[in-house]
Image (tube, helix red, strand yellow):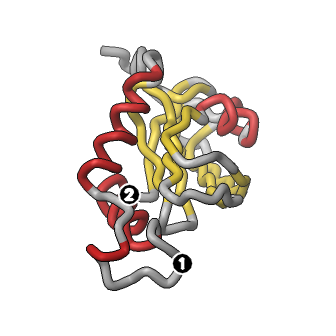
Amino acid sequence: MNKIENEDFGNKILFFQKEFTVNRKRGCHVITDEVLKSIPELKKIKIGMLNLFLKHTSASLIVNECYDPNVLKDLNNYLDRNIPDDESLYIHNDEGADDASSHIKNAFFGHSINIPITNGSLNLGTWQGIIFCEFRNMKSNRTIVATIQGTS
């Protein structure tokens, strides 16, 4: 276990917030590098937390294995098999057959993640990465709010 001590309790807590967009086809996609490029300010944080909040209800953010791309395919296949796009199953179909199913998938995966920051880097596990899951058939610009809090 790594132990990080901050002996200078006089440090100020820093807050930073920025929005950026992602645009992917339906499925689960690793976006860790894209997130890091979008928030270079993260490198200035010694100890802190990154919150990523997706401002949409038909897509999700998760942390999961990103080494084997089959994990992402399995996640997507599981969701499509268990929460199918089928207008006959749902009442809410204002935007098509994938409307209600996308909202239900988001309810399972969620729209917000927190990742510790240690010495300017995301403190993820060896195989972990940030995954963006698009549940709609049409690609859309999706806005993510990145909020960083920590000490420099």
Q: Between residues 48 and 18, which one lies in front from this camera angle?
A: 18
x and y, in percent, of residue 50 in the image = 53, 45
Query: Which corner quadrant holds the N terminus?
Result: top left
Per the rendering, the mark at residue 110 is 2
Query: Which corner quadrant holds the C terminus?
Result: top right
Q: Does residue 7 appear in this view?
A: no
Classify residue 83 by image quadrant. Answer: bottom left
Q: Which residue is mark 1?
A: 95
**Relative to 18, does residue 25 appear above or below in the rendering?**
above
Packing grade of label 1 (10 A; few <14, some 14-19, many >=20) is few
x and y, in percent, of residue 60 in the image = 46, 54
Residue at disc 2, secondary structure: loop
- Whichever of callouts 1 and 2 sits on the residue coming sooner in the sequence is 1
Which amino acid, mark 1?
Glu
Which amino acid, mark 2?
Gly
**Relative to 93, does residue 48 appear above or below in the rendering?**
above
Per the rendering, the mark at residue 47 is none
**Cα gap from disc 1 to disc 2, whole angstroms:** 20 Å
**Residue that appears at 44% across and 49% down:** 113
